[in-house]
Amino acid sequence: MKKILIISDGTAGEHFIQRVLKTYTSENIYYVVELKSREYEDVNPARFKFYEFDPTSFYKLSNLLKMEFVQVIIAMDSQLDVENTIKNIKLVKKHLRVIVLNQWDMKNEDTDVVMVNANELLASRLLDYLPNVPVIAQNVGIGEGEIMEVLVPFGSSFVYRHIGVIEQKNWRIVALYRNRKLLMPSRRRMIQPNDLLVLVGEPAVLKSVYRAIKRELGQFPEPFGSNIFLYVDMNIVNLSTIKELIRRAVFAHKKFKHDLVIKVVNPSNIATLQYIKEFRDNNVVVDIEYESRDLRNTFYNDIKAYHIGLVIVSAEMFANYRIRKTLYESHVPVLKLSDRSFSSVKDAAIILSDNRDLEKISATIFDISEQMGFNLEIYNYMNEHQEEKEQVIEHYYNLATIFSKSIKVIKENQNPIRTLRQKDNFVHILPFTQKLTKRRIYSFLSTDSEKLYYKLDNYHQIFIPVQL
């Protein structure tokens, strides 16, 4: 049994003793010293011993300290009384650990004296009640934000998503509260509005997850980044198409209302460079790389330096195996522009597959469709296994209800790629997974619609990473 000494005088000390009386442990015995005794309910006499005397009296306190205490907790309303009580304790037990409720910003260099700042505690607790501010566990773990509590708002991108399809890298959903009841998370459990999630993970990662949970439509390219990046390699892009590529990128930039960075590498045509420079203004940055460097590392550095959330490239550049792999490893959405008009696009098409990747990127798809004014069409190939697809369709219908956006589910008895190739114009949206980085020759005989993305190369395509 561990003996703990509590020295109390005032309202804070009284409330603390009341809380201690309700603790579950039976391993501690509490010796309580009060300047004036108080009546407490449900006191277990085997665990609590009460004394009434002035703790600033060295004679009286030293007699009590003849017992072996593991810790002393002081909660008193007078700074002078606290200082003298600490002095008395240290005269008898020099290395006894003392916890002090510090209401006066007191300083103490003794490593065995822990000052708990009352003002910081109050401010921290009040902060938990502010809307749109994450609640962080401060007395669990290392208290740096590795445990977080998040309320899921009605318009969240996480609403009506199954926990199993949420990519949880370096973080986990460890508990879910609904209607004040604890529900243990499972892969098939669906998150609903006003659910309270308890998250565990790296503090920096949890901050990003928090922003993603609270995100509503109109934020893309957040949470991937805040700016748009047009990447032009003049050794690859046909010079006759660059002007149209620039105009289409500027159109997308105005729709998303985020700054545009035009990066040109391997510059080779002065007239084209002059044309690009004419687009410079407060919201458009032109960055020309004149020196031959390691373009792969330069690209990654630019993504970080400009806080890029969407990369725009031409069809020729995305067809390049090395560039496509570099784009994938940057974990940023990619808009591949074809030679068709982009401003006239009205429909966004997604093709269902047997995996659940489309559910992982659903919120981003709705966000893009909302900002660009696209109609959302979902193509379901009926000759393939349907169970996983039906769950994804259910999820999209739920999101459509939340965001008040209509969707059209089209059932196809033939491969949807054949049907889409008959359409005049649209944008194809699909998950950006590792299998898309493979050389095209390896997917020539595949029936996977995602691996066959290049069959729709003549149309605009948006590739969205499945990881948060």
Image (cartoon, rainbow, N blue to C red):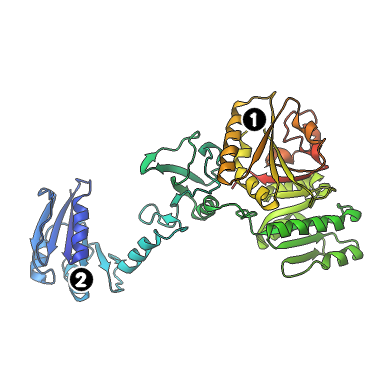
- Which labelled disc corresponds to residue 122? none
Spot occupied by residue 151 in the image (x, y as percentages of width and height): 45, 50
Q: Amino acid at mark 2?
A: Asp
Circle 2 residue: 77
- Which labelled disc corresponds to residue 354? 1
Of the residues under marks 1 and 2, which one precedes in the sequence? Answer: 2
Residue furthest bottom in the image:
80
Q: Secondary structure at mark 1?
A: loop
In this rendering, does residue 294 appear at all?
A: no
Disc 1 crowd, CA 10 A, few/some/many (<14, 14-19, 20+): some
- Foreground of the two, 26 or 1: 26
Q: Amino acid at mark 1?
A: Asp
Corner quadrant of residue 405: top right
Spot occupied by residue 409 in the image (x, y as percentages of width and height): 67, 34
Spot occupied by residue 213 in the image (x, y as percentages of width and height): 52, 50
- Foreground of the two, 348 or 104: 348
Disc 2 crowd, CA 10 A, few/some/many (<14, 14-19, 20+): some
Residue 45 as seen in the image, left or right of residue 373: left
Residue 147 as seen in the image, left or right of residue 214: left
Q: Residue at x 83, y 42 (%)?
A: 458
Q: Distance between the Cα atoms at labels 1 and 2?
A: 66 Å
Camera-near label (1 vs 2) is 1
- Foreground of the two, 180 or 270: 180
